[in-house]
Image (spheres, helix red, strand yellow):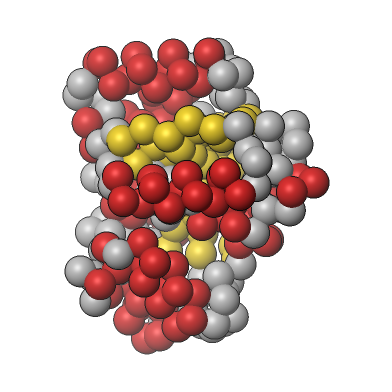
Amino acid sequence: MKSILSNSFLYFWIRYIITLGIPYKKWIREFKIDANSRILDLGCGPSDIIFFVKKSHSPSFYLGLDISGEYLEEAKNQLTKKNIDFKLEVIDLSLIGKDKNIDSKIISYSEMYALNIATLIGVIHHLSDEAVLNTLNMLYQSKSIQQVFTQDIIANRNLINDFFVKIDRGENVRTFEEYEVLLKKSNWKIKKVFWTTPGLFPIKYIHFNLTK
């Protein structure tokens, strides 16, 4: 299953079908994505969320960073169709905090394009504690980014939820308490914690809205 999900087309449709619909539209509302948004999407993948953004509410700029060139090609297609001004680049997020050139590049991009929101959609559960804190604290250094929105799966909910946790490619799925403790160690403040669920309601996603 994990190897199948490495294909961008299958990744989207398999997850969407077996979860009975991922709540992208609710994420768009909660993340306050609109014409005033200038987004840094870390670990953007194929930018699936852009597929659900109405053209009238499209962000004015979108910077997508991901380790997969294949995913970025799909992201390019989505962004071009929506006529969104964008930049995409292959970057290994696990090197943030270890490779100062990568840190400097991301901060430079964020300020160059006046990005005000950073999103980590399905990212944190792929990263070690150290990598999570390195990423968040790097983002905190940006003068323009004022908010961070996250989305992740959580462990120890119920049998159905934990089955999907087991087949997920992320190796660092945490409980709610573990996510909360970890994020509190960063320089950001937790402004809001909220939950969403796909059509398959036993599954729950945890979200944190972080502010300076």
Residue 189 higher or lower than 205, as above or below: above
**Residue 198 percent across, percent down from the top left:** 57, 74
Residue 58 higher or lower than 199, as above or below: above
> Relative to residue 27, is residue 151 drawn left or right?
left
Q: Quadrant of residue 201?
A: bottom right
Q: How many marks?
A: 0
Q: Quadrant of residue 165?
A: bottom left
> Relative to residue 134, is residue 17 drawn left or right?
right
Which residue is situated farthest in the bottom direction here? 159
Q: Nearer the viewer, residue 27 or 134?
A: 27
Residue 29 higher or lower than 202, as above or below: above
Q: Nearer the viewer, residue 190 or 140?
A: 140
Residue ID at (43%, 34%): 88
Residue ID at (63%, 38%): 84
Residue 88 higher or lower than 25, as above or below: above
Residue ID at (36%, 51%): 71
Residue ID at (60%, 32%): 85
> Relative to residue 174, is residue 2 drawn left or right?
left
* Quadrant in which the C terminus appears: top right
Q: Quadrant of residue 125?
A: bottom left
* Quadrant in which the N terminus appears: bottom left
| Residue 187 seen in this snapshot | no
| Residue 134 seen in this snapshot | yes
**Residue 64 percent across, percent down from the top left:** 45, 37
**Residue 162 percent across, percent down from the top left:** 35, 78
